[in-house]
Image: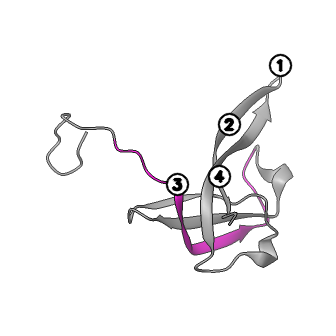
Amino acid sequence: MCNNCHSTDLEPYRLSGEGEVVSYTIVNRGSTGFNIYTPYVYAVVRLKEGVLVEGQMTDVSPSDIRIGMPVEVVVRKLLEYGKDGLIIYGYKFRPKIK
């Protein structure tokens, strides 16, 4: 639903998944389920289309993250829980491979 006019007459739009880091924080005390991954980086990324999205960084050391760093979306394991070991996947960002 559109936040402005409340219309439900919307069309799908595919985002590139490429962008750059505009802000980030290093999480040293994660919330339940994520505390085993600390420290990790949670970033705000501006995609090529201008949309701001946020997500966890992966495949990079927290000390190597920089504002303006080119990144791309990847699918990774977010967490695992329950006696059956249910795995939840989602998107994260990694430095863009040239």
Does the magenta-highlighted stretch encompass residue 28?
yes
Q: Quadrant of residue 6?
A: top left
Amino acid under disc 3: Gly
Q: Secondary structure at mark 3?
A: loop
Amino acid under disc 4: Lys
Q: Which residue corresponds to the image point at 78% horizontal and 71% vertical from the top-left?
A: 62
Give me the C-alpha separation between circle 2 and circle 4: 10 Å
Q: Quadrant of residue 94?
A: bottom right
What crowding class fits label 1: few (fewer than 14 Cα within 10 Å), some (14-19), or many (20 or more)? few
Q: Which residue corresponds to the image point at 83% horizontal and 19% vertical from the top-left?
A: 84
Q: Which residue corresponds to the image point at 70% horizontal and 63% vertical from the top-left?
A: 97
Colouring scheme, one of rainbow, by chain, secondary structure, one colour: one colour
Looking at this view, name the residue that lies furthest to the bottom. 67
Who comes first in sequence, dot 1 or dot 2?
Answer: 1
What crowding class fits label 4: few (fewer than 14 Cα within 10 Å), some (14-19), or many (20 or more)? many
Q: Which residue is mark 3?
A: 17
Give me the C-alpha separation between circle 1 and circle 3: 32 Å
Q: Any mark on residue 89, and which?
A: 2
Q: Where is residue 68 shown, x and y percent of the image?
A: 58, 79
Instruction: Please name whichever residue, 57 or 12, is drawn nearer the observer in this view of the structure.
Output: 12
Q: Which residue is mark 4?
A: 92
Amino acid under disc 2: Tyr
Nearer to us of marks 2 and 3 is: 3
Give me the C-alpha separation between circle 4 and circle 3: 10 Å
Q: Where is residue 31 shown, x and y percent of the image?
A: 72, 51
Who comes first in sequence, dot 2 or dot 3?
Answer: 3
Amino acid under disc 1: Asp
75 horizontally vs 36: left or right: left
Q: Secondary structure at mark 1?
A: loop
Who comes first in sequence, dot 4 or dot 3?
Answer: 3
